[in-house]
Image (tube, rainbow, N blue to C red):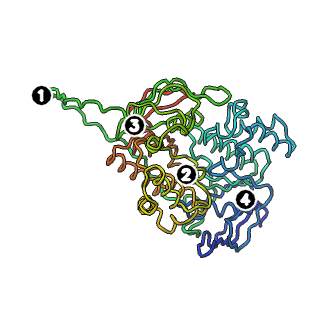
Amino acid sequence: MTGDDLATVDRLGVRVGARVLVDGVSLRVRAGRVTALVGPSGSGKTTTALALLGAYPEGAAVSGAVVPGPRVGYVPQHPGAVLNPARRVGVLLRDLARVHGGGPEAVARALRDAELADVDGVLRRFPHQLSGGQQQRVVLAQALLTGARVIVADEPTTGQDPVTTRRLAALLGRLTARGTGLLLLSHDLDLVRELADEVVLLADGRAVRTGPPADVLPLPLPLPQPKAQPKPSAAPLAPFRPTPEPPRPARLDVSGLTARHPGGAVVLHEVGLTLRPGECLALTGRSGSGKTTLGRCLAGLHPRHEGTVRLDGAPLPRSVRRRGRRELAAVQYVFQDAGAAFADHRPVLDQVARAAVRLRGLTPPAAAVEAGDLLAGLGLDPAKAARPTAALSGGELQRAALARALIVRPKVLVCDEITSGLDTATRAAILAHLADRRDRTGLALLFISHDPAAVTALADAVATLADGRLETAAPAHPFG
């Protein structure tokens, strides 16, 4: 390593059996500098980054040299995997602070530095009571408490609203200005352009291009714009009044929904919304505003709520444990952290097919055929579908999670930040698949997202949550 190198990777190779995950990748993390790893889902970014922590897939054969440097902090794409679900955030952080010679003031400062303003409220909660974005910032606070000289940040803005994304970008900039070395993994190319000093582009486990962002990254594409409305004629002959279509009956009707955390704190206040067959309602709002809690209430995963959720006019039980097979199939939820919804060591194909056996009554052979076709349509070929979920990238797992929800033929699909952390091509393919399914089958979608391009492409209307209160839905294209 040179004088300002904090960590280096030299011709790293990682192979599991006959499958090559990383092939000859080199990079360096320097003091006060940002190195970005970019590339499509499954290109080897996370495997390369985890080498700095000495973490490799089970059974991996490793070649090359890795010098990890002092105190490496890790902010994973799915932070729930590294937070102890049985301990409150305050206990986790105070214990960590004591180990590194800090006290309550250090904990509060780290949370504020990680853009978590409600310090006392966050400290009282368990990890599952935080949104995905809040969990991510808690893990960043952990890294700050350790005094890490090198931070590996895997999609740190995944699931964050635009304001928080800008603040996190500023925070990461301040950290590097103080001498921290940052290895940034991201599909957010605007963030990479803003922060990175050097970019390593991966494809199929190989570094295909290395250099400054201007030399490696493609030019940014403009967001899709809503279609312009036709201007009225200067002198219309007569007003045109089309015969209004009778309103379609509600597929999902929510009224007076008030949700609470176990301690009694109110998360959602008197929320009401209606979804009709073939409609997509986008749900936006700051991280921590209650979007995920609302989606979980609809799916029966957050039973601590009052009010009514009706499916085709019939009330749905609050808890998933009290819903029958048809009700479970009818309302499906796709998690932001797709990996947490799968067993690590079972093949993806088996787990997707199992949902059709359990909720549709298909035979295992018929379910396996249908699962394979659906996974292939979402970009997971038979070889990847045969792998255990632990061997798939985050983007590949997201597609598998969507396949498992769609195979039971739901009437309502709740998508919680399912395009965050995906490369452009994969995101476009998923949105096209959802649009086709909506148009062909009348699937009703609640699309939770901070992704303005995805909202513009898919949604009929947009509703915004602020402090647990739902604002009136408006036509789509709120960002243009």
Residue under the image location 53 percent in, 32 percent down: 318
Labels 4 and 2: the sequence-earlier one: 4
Mark nearest the camera among 1 and 2 is: 2
Q: Nearer the viewer, mark 1 or mark 3?
A: 3
Near-viewer residue (277 or 184)? 277
Could you tell me residue 115's position as x and y percent?
67, 37
Return the mark for residue 237: 1
Dot 2, how many residues are within 10 Å of its Cα: few (below 14), some (14-19), or many (20+)?
A: many
For the residues marked 4 and 3, what is the alpha-carbon distance in whole angstroms?
43 Å
Q: Which residue is mark 2?
A: 421
The answer to which of marks 1 and 2 sits earlier in the sequence is 1
Instruction: Inspect the image, locate mark 4, and give the three-letter code of the amino acid beneath it.
Output: Arg
Front residue of 299/194: it is 299
Would residue 178 be found to the left or right of residue 402 on screen?
Answer: right
For numbered disc 2, what is the local secondary structure? loop
In the rendered view of the protein, which quadrant contains the C terminus? top left
The kind of residue tagged 3 is: Ala
* Amino acid under disc 2: Gly
Left or right, residue 295 beside residue 137: left
- Locate residue 9, reporting x and y percent: 70, 67
Which mark is first along the chain, 1 or 4?
Answer: 4
User: Which quadrant holds the N terminus?
Assistant: bottom right
Of 312 and 196, which appears nearest the observer?
312
Bin the neighbour count of mark 1 within 10 Å (Cα to Cα): few under 14, some 14-19, many 20 and up.
few
Q: Are marks 1 and 2 in contact (CB under 8 Å)?
A: no
Residue 436 is situated, as x and y percent measured from the top left of the image, at 35, 50
Q: Is residue 285 visible?
A: no
Residue type of the residue flagged with mark 1: Leu
Q: Residue at x 43, y 26 (%)?
A: 472
Q: Which residue is mark 4?
A: 30
Disc 4 vs disc 3: which is toward the camera? 3
